[in-house]
Image (cartoon, helix red, strand yellow):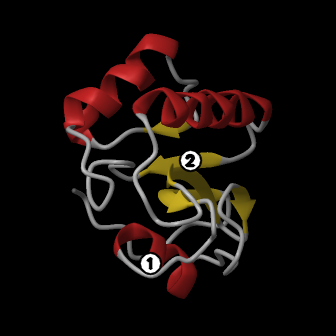
Amino acid sequence: MEMINELKENQIFVFGSNLAGIHGGGAAFDALSKFGAIYGQGIGLQGSSYAIPTKDDNIETLPLAIIEKYIVDFIEFAKSRPDLEFLVTQVGCGLAGYSIEEISSIFKKYGVSENVKLPVAFL
């Protein structure tokens, strides 16, 4: 995965989260420590980051069909905010344990707007 260490003013760091909003590891920890993610908020825009849930309140991996719903919500949100550029991490492919193919196929199925930058592995 490409490391994202800083953002421009209009950029948003998109990461996999849990519904409890415990941003304790992986990209979620980076979102909390660097990009304004809010502890206790597991979904949506927060600071310069956007949380896509991949785990539930008990930090158990969500079924792929549920993650797909959250990805679709994100895609629609990004379309509504052409003023922002969304830098997507390999959501669901780290601590949640899904393969790159499983997650990237969801993004491909629905398509993303030009302001969404997917990881190279997803292309």
Q: Is residue 82 above or below residue 25?
A: above
Quadrant in which residue 38 is drawn: bottom right
For disc 2, the marked residue is: 86
Q: Is residue 123 visible?
A: no
Residue 95: give x, y in percent of width and height.
29, 62
User: In the picture provided, is 112 more to the left or to the right than 45?
Assistant: left
Q: Is residue 35 above or below residue 51?
A: below
Residue 102: give x, y in percent of width and height.
27, 28
Check disc 1 and give the amino acid type: Asp
Disc 1 crowd rating (10 Å Cα; few below 14, some 14-19, many 20+) is some
Who's the residue at 44% across and 78% down the image? 30
Who's the residue at 48% across and 26% down the image? 65
Q: Is residue 111 visible?
A: yes
Quadrant in which residue 80 is drawn: top right
| Element class at badge 1 | helix
Check the picture and name the quadrant holding the C terminus: top left
Check the picture and name the quadrant holding the N terminus: bottom left
CA gap, disc 2 and disc 1 = 15 Å
User: In the picture provided, is 20 more to the left or to the right than 30?
Assistant: right
Who's the residue at 64% across and 74% down the image? 37
Check disc 2 and give the amino acid type: Phe
- In primary-sequence order, the first of circles 2 and 1 is 1
For disc 1, the marked residue is: 30
- Between residues 66 and 16, which one lies in front from this camera angle? 66
Name, please, the residue furthest toward the right: 80
Cβ–Cβ under 8 Å for marks 2 and 1: no
Name, please, the residue furthest toward the top: 109
- Between residues 60 and 79, which one lies in front from this camera angle? 60
